[in-house]
Amino acid sequence: MASSDYYEVLGLTKSATADEIRKAYRKLSRTYHPDAKKDDPEAAKRFQEIQEAHDVLGDEEKRKKYDRFGPNFAQMDKMGGGAPHGQPWPGGGPGPGAGGFDFQELFGGVDLGDMFGGGRGGPRGARRAPPKGEDIRATLKVPFEIAARGGSQDIRLDRGGKIETLGVKIPAGIADGGVMRLAGQGEPSFRGGPPGDLLLTIQIQPHAWFRREGNNLLLDVPLTPAEAALGTKVEVPTLTEGKVTLTVPPGTSSGMKLRLRGKGIVDPQSHQTGDQFVVVKIAVPKELSPEQKTLYESLQPLDPSPRAGLW
């Protein structure tokens, strides 16, 4: 690398937050991507420096070790953080022959078995797996009905500096705040490794009528005082079967829940379907006609007080 300071490579200081590191990496990787600077012979080298810096600073554990030991943190980590018996060798680095020290680190990951005709360091020709690309985290807004019934929803992503549209299959019954992992849909590795993953946090948009409690649906239905007192039949919407007729029994109070079995949301784990509850809301007219007022006044002395014996 042209600079051994990974923070300097990304144009940051040691106090940079994880979010600042991620933003700097994305901005610089787009700027110096070889496809974006085909005529610049230094772009590929600069791009590799950016990738190396982010591989370390973008990983919380690696960053801690880098901040403590510097660019040689990998060797120090294999030696347990210091020279054998606490004795440093010239230059302040770890001494030779320390327990657990991997000499391959000194040769940039070159397989010493290949260099010396095979040896006891492991299988001949063994290589470390190349690192995978960075994961992408995003929020996907999903309509209420698609989240409940399942379906497909598009999302636009910035991957490798390119804007792409991806169709996401939404499983029926997914909960608000749930996270979906789409393997291989993250940032490319640029080092021969597999791409990262796409982690989508689901944000369910509200419905005009329904609300959700677990796998059950709730729907408010207004009734007149007469309908609630005498009983009636009303048409109510469902999420999957259109409108159905609901029987309201006489003497139904405001706030009572009437159950429609099996008309809720499918549980993605047990595959059991919840219920729909119709919540009764008695709607009293704000203004009464003279005839209505006369009738209500005649009923008033006949109605027992609902507060009798309550307190």
Image (spheres, grey):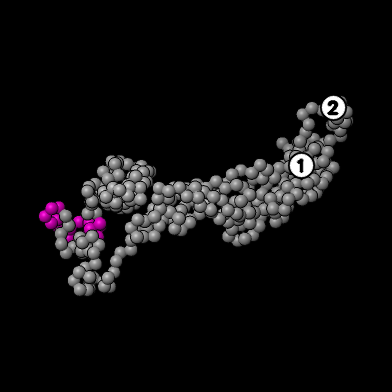
Categorize mark 2 by other alpha carbons within 10 Å: few (<14), some (14-19), many (20+).
Answer: few
Q: Callout 1, which amino acid? A: Ser
Q: Earlier in the sequence, mark 1 or mark 2?
A: 1
Quadrant of the drawing holding the C terminus: top right
Percent of width and height locating residue 304: 82, 36
Q: Nearer the viewer, residue 205 or 116?
A: 116
Q: Which residues are magenta?
A: 74-92
Q: What residue appears at the point 73 percent right and 47 percent down from the top-left corner?
A: 237
Q: Quadrant of residue 297?
A: top right
Categorize mark 1 by other alpha carbons within 10 Å: few (<14), some (14-19), many (20+).
Answer: some
Q: Residue furthest top?
A: 290
Q: What residue appears at the point 83 percent right and 38 percent down from the top-left corner?
A: 226
Instruction: Report which residue position mark 1 lands on.
Output: 253
77 drawn magenta: yes
Q: What residue appears at the point 29 percent right and 66 percent down from the top-left corner?
A: 127
Q: Residue furthest front?
A: 39
Q: Nearer the viewer, residue 171 or 64?
A: 171
81 drawn magenta: yes
